[in-house]
């Protein structure tokens, strides 16, 4: 009944999904490109050669153990933009289903205690009305049966947009941006969820906070990731 009153929008073309009852148009199934091997064994970026790590991860000392992204960013960029800023939170259901299907084995091997979405700063959350990373985490949780801890990590700093910043500027921008909302964290293995992986600075800072709180095994999953060499 809900879909009859509010028809589902296609995450690829943003039109009303055809055929009715599906999550994506039949003609749009091939528009999003799954990141195929070879990929970086640390951050999951698509590689142009058979190297084990991308150039960024060869130089960086990440706080997370490993991560994966589902789609090549260029193929899904407009969809992610509408998901974040265009009130298309319904896209999360399709994204979560696809992540469970294509990254399900990766998730099972990790066997996490919880999924942790990267939080939004309070005023930004109030303005947008929802946190896209939380919507994505909840969708993944529905399809995998893994619990989601949406309130455990808090963002207390209003960081500036990262896309025009250098790596060092990104680190400075995110320093002390996150805190743990509880004194005791009993989780031992977590997967941090975000929408996009670029340099990993945001995920690194979140992972660092959890590592200081005693979490031993920290991984990440994002919807989209870049391409490296």
Image: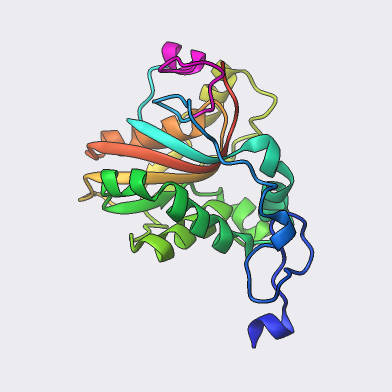
Quadrant (top left, top right, bottom left, bottom right) of the N terminus: bottom right
Using the rendered view, name the quadrant where residue 130 is placed: bottom right
Q: Is residue 211 above or below residue 18?
A: above
Coloring scheme used: rainbow
Counting from the top left corner in percent of width and height, residue 121 is at 56, 48
| Residue 87 appears in the rendering | no
Q: Say whether residue 31 is left or right of residue 133.
A: right
Counting from the top left corner in percent of width and height, residue 80 is at 67, 48
At 38% from the left and 59% from the top, the residue drawn is 148
Q: Is residue 55 above or below residue 120?
A: above
At 50% from the left and 13% from the top, the residue drawn is 55
Using the rendered view, name the quadrant where residue 140 is placed: bottom left
At 44% from the left and 14% from the top, the residue drawn is 51
Q: Say whether residue 80 is left or right of residue 105.
A: right
Using the rendered view, name the quadrant where residue 191 is placed: top left
Counting from the top left corner in percent of width and height, residue 202 is at 50, 33
Q: Is residue 45 above or below residue 106?
A: above
Task: Magenta stretch: give its range.
Answer: 45-59
| Residue 195 appears in the rendering | yes
Secondary structure mainly formed by the magenta segment: loop
Counting from the top left corner in percent of width and height, residue 107 is at 34, 47
């Amino acid at each position: 009944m809900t879909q009859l009153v509010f028809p589902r929008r296609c995450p690829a073309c943003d039109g009303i999904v055809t055929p009715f009852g599906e999550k994506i148009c039949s003609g749009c199934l091939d528009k999003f490109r799954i990141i195929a091997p070879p990929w970086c064994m640390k951050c999951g970026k698509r590689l142009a050669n058979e190297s084990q790590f991308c150039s960024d991860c060869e130089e960086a000392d990440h706080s997370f153990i490993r991560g994966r992204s589902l789609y090549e960013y260029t193929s899904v960029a407009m969809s992610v933009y509408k998901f974040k800023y265009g009130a298309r939170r319904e896209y999360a259901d399709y994204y979560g289903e696809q992540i469970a299907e294509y990254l399900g084995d990766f998730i099972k091997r990790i066997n996490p205690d919880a999924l942790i979405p990267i939080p939004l700063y309070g005023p930004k959350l109030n303005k947008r009305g929802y946190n896209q990373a939380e919507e994505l985490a909840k969708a993944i949780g529905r399809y995998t049966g893994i619990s989601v801890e949406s309130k455990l990590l808090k963002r207390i700093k209003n960081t500036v947009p990262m896309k025009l910043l250098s790596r060092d500027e990104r680190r400075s921008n995110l320093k002390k941006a996150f805190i743990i909302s509880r004194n005791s964290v009993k989780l031992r293995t977590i997967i941090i969820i975000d929408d996009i992986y670029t340099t990993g600075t945001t995920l690194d800072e979140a992972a660092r906070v959890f590592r200081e709180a005693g979490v031993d095994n920290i991984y990440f999953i994002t919807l989209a990731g870049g391409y490296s060499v």
